[in-house]
Image: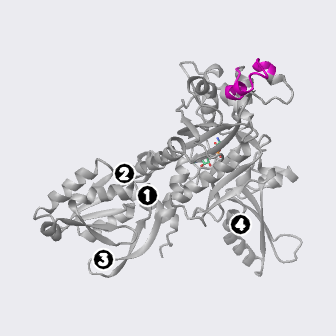
Amino acid sequence: MAAEQTFMDKLTALCKRRGFIYQSSEIYGGIGGFWDYGPLGVELKRNIKERWWQDMVIDPPCGPDGREVEMVGVDCAIIMNPKVWEASGHATGFADPMVDCRKCRGRFRLDQVFRIEARRPDAAEPFAVFTVQGDGTHSALEAARPRAMKLSKKHGGGEFALAAASFKDVLATDPRVELLACPTCDEPGTLTEPRQFNLMFQTYVGALQDASSLAYLRPETAQGIFANFKNVLDTTRVKVPFGIAQIGKSFRNEINPRNYTFRSREFEQMEIEFFCSDASSMEWYEFWRKVRYDWYVKLGLRSDKLRLRDQTPAELAHYSKACADIEYLFPFSDEFQELEGVAHRGNFDLSQHARFSGKDLTYFDDEAWERDKERFPDPEQARQAKNAPPYRYLPTVIEPSAGVDRAALAFLCEAYTEDAAPDEKGELQTRVVMKFHPQLAPVKVAFFPLVNKEGMPEIAAALYREARRYMPAFFDDKGAIGRRYRRQDEIGTPYCVTVDGDTLRDGSVTIRDRDTLAQVRVKKEGVIAWLRERLGR
Ligand code: GAP
């Protein structure tokens, strides 16, 4: 009997079949952690990025003080001077502790391998101890259950409970790695001592390949923004508070790329570094936390699968006052997973870059000084004066940092729906429909002639040609009309326009709504305006 398809099996099959996402270099057997976006995937991703740029950079909501929020963008090189990564801490700190197995050559992140203990109620000793891999405690326990059941039967059956502890936690209390089993070989004694594994991809710049030409593919876009802070200040008229935004590729040599595109080795980020005074920073933090959460809700992520989780004080970086993760309950896990982080970063990054580059990255608040000029004719004197406002300072940073691919995956998961729709004979059939928010849908409208005669194809083609000037559109004259609707439902096209016998008689066409299946008749001269109004194009 064929195994039942999981939600992710169905979604990944649809993404492949309809050209959303392909495995990278698939004809050569693929390569772990890299993905290609097909004709529909690229439109979806473009829509996400364009929406983000429009809503965060071009026209962001008003700030906590009710004033316009000032935002500008940059597009920095992927390869930067390696000193950037020394200053940011990535060269030394951007590492996961790992163990290697000498026997199977597997490499495992300490926080993603779990020692499982299966124990009878009230028993002092477990009847089984073994190792599984998992994204978190919950998924490790799920992975362990079938094996624990088998072992329980072997040991006479009966009730049992499972406990999972990551190798990271186990080794923190007892550092003897030789007691732990490799999850693949299933025997203790084959694992190496834990080692730090730097996640940055290395390359060489120029002809020489030695330490002097070593460089890195950026693991985040944020540092390009910090490195250009002074350039932006010097070449534009921005004033604190303001933000710099960037969208671009980042690269991390993840040990366990997994869960489809969720953890990839090459991915895109959409990051904002928002510079403000320390006194106003918590207000701005609250502002961005809410703006970013609302953005996902507005674009269709259902609120019960989306949550905003404040990090506990123990999770916070030493320089951070607060951090919130926007998390989504992806179908491949029982635990919420990070979609975006909104972090209060203090002035850590700017002070690091000032120190490592030797450049003055302070901001001079000339307007505040102007107001106080009589009191302090010399700005330096003002800075020194007791109780004087700080005219020159390193701004505090709030960083909303999102992943384009993770957002795309969440929107795909949320959109995938199976419901029932009547076929040509009026009988209800299961249909697969991607209920994307219209602004994210890769194709906005499809045009069909009901039959390929009596001038219907010509009218439909003319409407299609006009629609393309404003929005991605599709023309389809192949197969039964019901099948054409279903093909568009499966890729999430919000509207289908059909030219039929009535069009020839009274000049009207049918417009069918993807979600409600409601059909309205609209004069063909007014169709494009009707669509543009509803789709905001
Ligand atoms: N500048 C801060 C920063 O990069 P992060 O939490 O490491 O923070 C931010 O990354 C976002 O980038 C994540 O919330 C996620 O959406 C995305 N991201 C990070 N690593 C990723 C990976 N391996 N694959 C796909 N997306 C990733």
Give x and y (percent) for residue 177.
81, 50
Q: Nearer the viewer, mark 2 or mark 1?
A: 2
Residue 386 in which image quadrant: top right
Amino acid bearing label 1 = Cys
What residue is pinned by disc 4? 141
Q: Do the numbered discs 4 and 2 sit on residues whose CB atoms are within 8 Å?
A: no
Q: Mark number for residue 423? A: 3
Q: Nearer the viewer, mark 3 or mark 4?
A: 3
How busy is the neighbourhood of tag 3: few (under 14 within 10 Å), some, or many (20 plus)?
Answer: some
Mark 1 or mark 4: which comes first in sequence?
1
Secondary element under disc 1, as helix, strand or loop, is helix
Mark 3 or mark 4: which comes first in sequence?
4
Q: Nearer the viewer, mark 3 or mark 1?
A: 3
Mark 4 or mark 2: which comes first in sequence?
4
The range drawn in magenta is 359-381
Between the residue at mark 1 and the residue at mark 4, the CA separation in whole angstroms equals 30 Å
How busy is the neighbourhood of tag 4: few (under 14 within 10 Å), some, or many (20 plus)?
Answer: many
Q: Is mark 4 within 8 Å of ligand 1?
A: no
Mark 2 or mark 1: which comes first in sequence?
1
Amino acid bearing label 2 = Arg
Amino acid bearing label 4 = Leu
Between the residue at mark 3 and the residue at mark 2, the CA separation in whole angstroms equals 31 Å
Q: Residue at x 70, y 57 (%)?
A: 309
How busy is the neighbourhood of tag 1: few (under 14 within 10 Å), some, or many (20 plus)?
Answer: many
What residue is pinned by disc 2? 537
What residue is pinned by disc 1? 15
Give x and y (percent) for residue 78.
55, 32
